[in-house]
Amino acid sequence: MRPRHTSDDPARAREFAAYVAGAGGRLLHTATLLTAEARNDNPRARRLVTLALAHTYACWDRLHGEDPYDHTRQDLAARFAHGAWHQHVGPLRPRSRSRPTGPLAALTPQERLVLVIRLYEGVDGERTAALLGLPVERVRTIFNRAMATVLRPARPPAPAVGGVEAVPS
C-alpha cells in the first residue's frame, strides 16, 4: 500500500506552491472574466479559483505527467458551469448582491465560458466542446454569438430631447 501524503510533505507543498505562484494570477483573471466581476471586487472568482486549486492539490500526486494547469482549468470551468446552472434554475442560497459589471457582463454564463476558454485560454473548438460536453457545432455557434455581442454591444437609449423623456420600451 502506498503511503498517503499529508500536508506535512514539504517537497509536495513546495512544488504546489511554485505552481500556484506561476498560474494563480492567470487562473484568477480567467475566473474574473467568467464571473464578469470587477477586477478589484471579485469574491465569486476568488472562491472558484480557491476551490479549483484545492481540488488540484488533492489530485497532485495522481496527475502523472498531466498538465496541472489544464487540470485546474477544467475544474474551474466545471465549477463555474455548475454554479451558473444552479443560479439559472434557482439557487438554494441567496444570490450575491453584486451584478456582473465586467466587459463580458452582457453575455450569458455559457457564452462567457466558451468565449473565455476559446479566446483568453486559447483552447481550440474541439477541446472546448469536449471540456463542456457539447457538440463542436454548438460551441462554434455559442462562440460566434458571444463575439457578435462583444463586438457590437447594444446601444444605450437615446437622450431626452427638449425636456421630453424617452418612453421605455
Image (tube, rainbow, N blue to C red):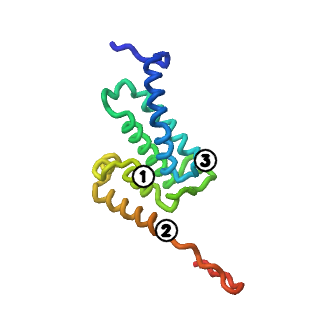
Left/right of residue 162 with respect to residue 93 in the rendered view: right
- Neighbor class of circle 3 (other Cα within 10 Å; few <14, some 14-19, many 20+) is few
Q: Secondary structure at mark 3?
A: loop
How far apart marks 2 and 3 lie (CA) works out to: 24 Å
Q: In which quadrant of the rendered image does the N terminus lie?
A: top left
Relative vertical location of residue 156 with respect to residue 117 in this rendering, above or below: below
Instruction: Tell me which numbered mark, 2 or 3, is placed earlier along the sequence.
Output: 3
- Hey, what amino acid is under mark 1? Val
Mark 2 falls on what kind of element?
A: loop
Instruction: Give how far across and how far down residue 26 sits, in percent.
Output: 47, 42
Q: Secondary structure at mark 1?
A: helix
Q: What's the distance in space between the residues labelled 2 and 1, CA to CA?
A: 17 Å
Residue ID at (59%, 76%):
157
Which of the 4 image quarters holds residue 46?
Answer: top right
Q: Earlier in the sequence, mark 2 or mark 1?
A: 1
* Crowd class of label 1 (few under 14; some 14 to 19; many from 20; radius 10 Å): many
Q: Which residue is mark 1?
A: 116
Residue 31: x and y in percent read 49, 46
Residue 40 has which mark? 3
Determine whether label 2 and label 1 are within 8 Å by CB. no
52 relative to 137, above or below: above
Residue bearing the label numbered 2 = 153
Nearest the camera: 88 or 156? 156
Where does residue 137 sit, x and y in percent of width and height?
28, 59
Q: Label 2 amino acid? A: Pro
- Residue at the image position 39 percent from the left and 27 percent from the top: 60
